[in-house]
Image (cartoon, rainbow, N blue to C red):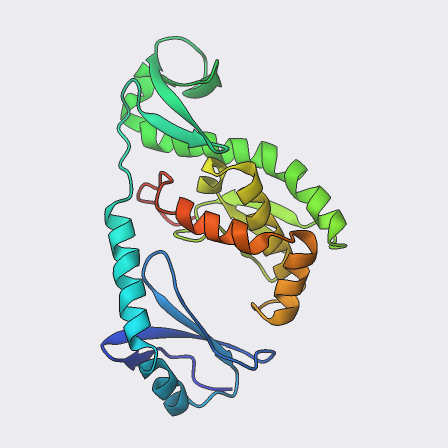
Amino acid sequence: MMSVGPLQVGGLEIELDPDRARTSVRITVERDARVIAKVPADADRDELATLIRGRLPWLYAKINARRAEAAERPRRRFIDGEGFWYLGRSHRLKLTDEGTRPVALKGGRLLLRRDHYETAQQDLVAWYVTRGRDWLPGRMHPWAQRMDIPDADLNVRPLGYRWGSCSHHGTVNIHWATMQLPARLIDYVLVHELAHLRHANHSPPFWRTVGRALTDYERRRNELDGWGAGVWLPEETSG
């Protein structure tokens, strides 16, 4: 197997992700502007470097777009009237002295207890996590049945700039920020990760598995990319 150390090409650091099942090279620019190349396990590093040099203009443009997107990411203030997305709908924040929980959704308003103002960010993230753990399993299980994939364990947690991930033990991880998306886009994230339980890479069989469940997955994927810059995503700690 080839060395997995990053490639330096044209002033860029390219992370390599070798896969024995892959026969082609797929280069992506993540939302945090990292460049990742999914490559065959026996790929030649010099040949890879030559291939990447041919794509440098596209890579530079994509990286600049990702950085501009990050710079424009909305900053939320914890004041009356500020909007926070939940399942594709914007809810206005209201500071209150009532209630027993730090954050609650009531009557279309997102209520934040005034005595939790100093911990508002952590409390709101915890609210999204709790909502996800309650809502997502019931959404995922029908898709798993439709795809003939045994029900996986599901975890809701910070994932940096990824909507979801899949562990080698069969656990589907979903970013808490996904709960800001419309349900149809959450479905795409769930189907995408469930398909990874069958196919570790983004090979043609993987996309066929996704396509059998969601015939319009390409439209949803493009729509999801547009939502990426609009969700609230504060600085996170790992966990």
Observer-nearest residue: 60 or 70?
A: 60
- Asked if residue 182 lies left or right of residue 53, the reply is right
Residue drawn at x 31%, y 19% is 81
- Place residue 139 in its image quadrant: top right
At a point 31% along the width and 64% down the height, the residue shown is 62
Residue 143, percent from left and from top: 69, 47
Instruction: State the residue at coordinates (40%, 85%).
Output: 48
Q: Nearer the viewer, residue 22 or 89?
A: 89
Q: Residue at x 42, y 31 (%)?
A: 85
Question: What is the x, y in percent for residue 215?
Answer: 65, 53
* Vertical position of residue 177 compared to residue 20: above or below: above
Residue 185 place in picture, x, y as percent: 53, 44
**Position above or below: 34 against 163:** below
Q: 111 or 53: which is nearer to us?
A: 53
Q: Is residue 19 visible?
A: yes
Q: Nearer the viewer, residue 180 or 227?
A: 227
Residue 221 is left or right of residue 64, and the answer is right
- Residue 3 placement: quadrant: bottom left
Residue 169 showing in the rendered view: no
Q: How many marks?
A: 0
**Residue 224 drawn at (x, y percent):** 47, 48
